[in-house]
Amino acid sequence: MGSLFIAFLMPGIAYASTTSVLETASQYKVAVANSHLNQWDFFNLTLHGRLQKGMAVSTPCFPVFDGKNKTFNSTACDDVQIGYTNPLFRAPIFGAYMLPQWEGCQSSGEQCLLDSSNTSNPAAWTDFRCSQGSVAPYYIDVRDASDVNKAFAFSLATGVRLSIKNSGHDYKGRSSGRDTLSLWMHNLQSIKHSTVFVPKGCKPSASYNAVTIGAGTYFQQIYDFAEAHNITVIGGYHQTIAASGGWVQGGGHSILSPVYGLGVDRVVEFKIVTPDGRHRIANECQNRDLFWALRGGGGSTWGVVMETTHKVEPQLKLQVASISFNQTATNAFPWLNIVTQTALKWSKEGWGGHIRANNLINVNPRLTLAEAKASLKNISDYALSQNGTVTIETLPSWKTFFDKYVTGAESGVGNIITLGTRLIPAANFETEEGLDAVYEMLKGFLPVASPNIILGTPFLYKHTGGSTSVTPAWRNSVWHLAMHEAWNFNTSTTQKVVAYKNITNIVQSMRDISPHSGSYVNEGDLYEPNHTRAFWGDNYPRLLSIKKKYDPCGLLDCWQCVGWKGANDPLFSCYLKE
Ligand SMILES: Cc1cc2nc3c(=O)[nH]c(=O)nc-3n(C[C@H](O)[C@H](O)[C@H](O)COP(=O)(O)OP(=O)(O)OC[C@H]3O[C@@H](n4cnc5c(N)ncnc54)[C@H](O)[C@@H]3O)c2cc1C
Ligand SMILES: *[C@@H]1O[C@H](CO)[C@@H](O)[C@H](O)[C@H]1NC(C)=O
Ligand SMILES: *[C@@H]1O[C@H](CO)[C@@H](O)[C@H](O)[C@H]1NC(C)=O
Ligand SMILES: *[C@@H]1O[C@H](CO)[C@@H](O)[C@H](O)[C@H]1NC(C)=O
Ligand SMILES: *[C@@H]1O[C@H](CO)[C@@H](O)[C@H](O)[C@H]1NC(C)=O
Ligand SMILES: *[C@@H]1O[C@H](CO)[C@@H](O)[C@H](O)[C@H]1NC(C)=O
Ligand SMILES: *[C@@H]1O[C@H](CO)[C@@H](O)[C@H](O)[C@H]1NC(C)=O
Ligand SMILES: *[C@@H]1O[C@H](CO)[C@@H](O)[C@H](O)[C@H]1NC(C)=O
Ligand SMILES: *[C@@H]1O[C@H](CO)[C@@H](O)[C@H](O)[C@H]1NC(C)=O
Ligand SMILES: *[C@@H]1O[C@H](CO)[C@@H](O)[C@H](O)[C@H]1NC(C)=O
Ligand SMILES: *[C@@H]1O[C@H](CO)[C@@H](O)[C@H](O)[C@H]1NC(C)=O
Ligand SMILES: *[C@@H]1O[C@H](CO)[C@@H](O)[C@H](O)[C@H]1NC(C)=O
């Protein structure tokens, strides 16, 4: 095997930060040729036996995999059936995605999915071919930067494409990929708090009260930690989203964002391995172009993020409102009218939350309880007139709010869902014509599904202009407006295409009333027609030049990401052509 092989095995020699990935890749080619092993077995050796095989989480319930009979394991199948829609069950399993259509191959119909409405329905495993699908056949359970460096070199040497999986929350399938080698970030679990965090290379006077979070750590863990440390971390509305992966790199909204900014506004440092093989620290004092790109340019584009650091707030007392009523054929209309008429006022007052056709759960860190009640009087009165329920109360912290209201109301997982969204600017709410257009549009959605009106834009947050690469549309919008379509395990391919088209059409009605706005890259229409415009606006050309600088060989790519090679690239062969 010779000395090159030894060099490849020894991180201290081959993976010093000065060794370029090109050099490592050519060493690899020589070493694998001399080893007489196949590329995977050789690669596994260099990883000290840590290369693993990936398979969709529900495979134990299927009697046949990739055309081969196998023994049915009823214990393992029972676990999947019980845990199927539980995010805490899915999160620690490599082959489980929150939106399970990204485990299968939608274009070929191969899938190992259960009936999410009844996970013991045997039709799921008798009527469908279970196969590898979009789950990576090989993955590395990443533990340090040298694992990532080896993966880049392997990809360069062999042409095997890469994917990065963290919590598996991605709505657009960007964390799986047919025939890829996957980097699984979940087990980088760590969190620490410093009241005087100084970004590397910055003056000590520029310190922050901040938490540093390992790539795989997710929000339930972070909120528990924050509560124990009497601080508030601004994060997402779901237990298992990871704070350092796609969420923050794509923007990262919270219902506290109206006052405290997006994830990209709060992150002060990234530790990342870029595709040239270097372990870098990006912040306001060094690698500033990369720091800017990471603050909105999206996941799976700039490298593999190992850790991020986020500013924290003190413990926050919150005014919390939960209002709901039973919907009839028409009683959602007056409700949506009040919601539209009052949108701008609520944004100016700092409200965040989620408003549906017959309920809302909102929070406000700025008002007193009396002010909160007065602010919501019209909408509360309307709900009460419909025999609904109104609770407006003060809670002592984000975690008390999260545990009481969010874990029971967060978006479901294990169900097949696709989303389309648009950022709706304040200007739409400033004139009678604008208000009418918004209201008519919402009314038009009701026969299809309930709109999800997310008060999560950084409306009051004073950000430093030009400091982030998200679409500037975030800054002047009052709503992040979402609609979804859902389907089940046995929906036909034709019907799936119709569902995706429906979302594109629904979002078109949002684009029509906000032609100069944009949308949130992580929750956009999968088939966004002018995606670079919608997700990044005028920031796109600079993002593309930074992408070429740090990933000159194009080792990372994902659907509609910066530098995307396009739908016809083999990496995207499982996406349906709309
Ligand atoms: C139920 C649900 C609720 C949600 N709620 C919110 C919400 O409240 N607010 C909000 O803003 N968004 C929300 N989202 C959207 C969420 O932000 C995105 O799904 C996001 O992509 C998740 O990032 P992840 O890393 O956790 O997931 P993954 O699916 O694992 O990864 C997402 C993308 O990031 C890349 N990536 C992951 N880790 C890394 C890394 N360490 N380095 C480089 N690239 C990486 C992946 O390759 C992929 O492209 C929600 C999604 C779901 C399914
Ligand atoms: C990698 O090697 C280890 C140790 O020999 C083995 O247990 C594991 O199955 C191998 N992985 C793959 C994907 O073959
Ligand atoms: C798989 O099992 C089926 C039914 O149990 C059987 O008819 C078939 O011959 C088996 N195939 C192989 C390759 O063993
Ligand atoms: C069946 O699955 C269970 C639970 O995942 C596992 O502990 C067990 O080893 C499996 N049995 C076989 C025979 O693979
Ligand atoms: C789920 O499917 C199983 C098997 O077909 C059936 O016995 C059971 O009644 C179903 N459960 C529900 C709640 O429909
Ligand atoms: C927690 O933080 C709040 C706000 O900063 C402060 O008022 C309170 O005294 C702190 N509580 C404890 C137990 O430290
Ligand atoms: C809706 O109606 C059901 C059944 O009549 C009732 O139990 C429930 O409390 C009502 N919900 C609200 C929010 O009014
Ligand atoms: C309630 O509605 C009335 C009539 O539209 C309006 O004048 C008033 O400002 C609203 N009050 C609040 C608190 O929004
Ligand atoms: C509310 O409840 C009262 C008393 O039960 C009933 O008379 C009234 O019709 C209900 N109103 C609505 C809108 O359901
Ligand atoms: C899908 O499966 C469900 C439950 O088994 C069944 O009721 C439904 O008719 C099936 N739909 C299609 C399109 O086959
Ligand atoms: C698509 O939209 C049409 C019209 O709004 C609706 O009737 C249909 O059920 C939708 N189809 C799917 C698959 O969602
Ligand atoms: C995308 O939007 C930009 C800016 O509005 C425009 O110049 C460009 O022509 C659009 N591209 C397509 C394909 O519509």
Image (cartoon, grey):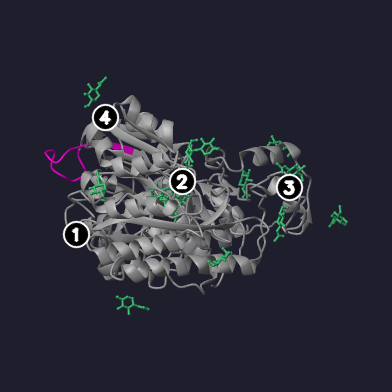
Camera-side residue of 358 and 524: 358
Query: Mark 3 or mark 1, which is nearer to you?
Result: 3
Q: Identify the residue position indicated by label 2 in the image.
A: 185
Under tag 1, what secondary structure? loop
Residue marked by disc 1: 466
CB at disc 1 and ligand 12 closer than 8 Å? no
The image quadrant that residue 225 belongs to is: top left
Which of the numbered marks, if any, corresponds to residue 121? Answer: 3
Quarter of the picture containing the N terminus is bottom right
Instruction: Please report whichever mark, 1 or 2, sits nearer to the chain's N-terminal start.
Output: 2
Residue placed most toward the observer, 574 or 11: 574
Segment colored magenta: 198-212
Q: Is mark 4 within 8 Å of ligand 6?
A: yes
Q: Are marks 2 and 4 in contact (CB under 8 Å)?
A: no
- Give the residue type that dot 2 points to: Met
Where does residue 36 sit, x and y in percent of width and height?
Answer: 63, 59
Residue receiving disc 4: 315
The kind of residue tagged 3 is Asn
Q: Position of residue 543 (x, y in %)?
A: 29, 65
On the image, the x and y values in percent for residue 127 come to: 76, 57
Some atom of ligand 1 lies within 8 Å of the CB belonging to the residue at label 2? yes
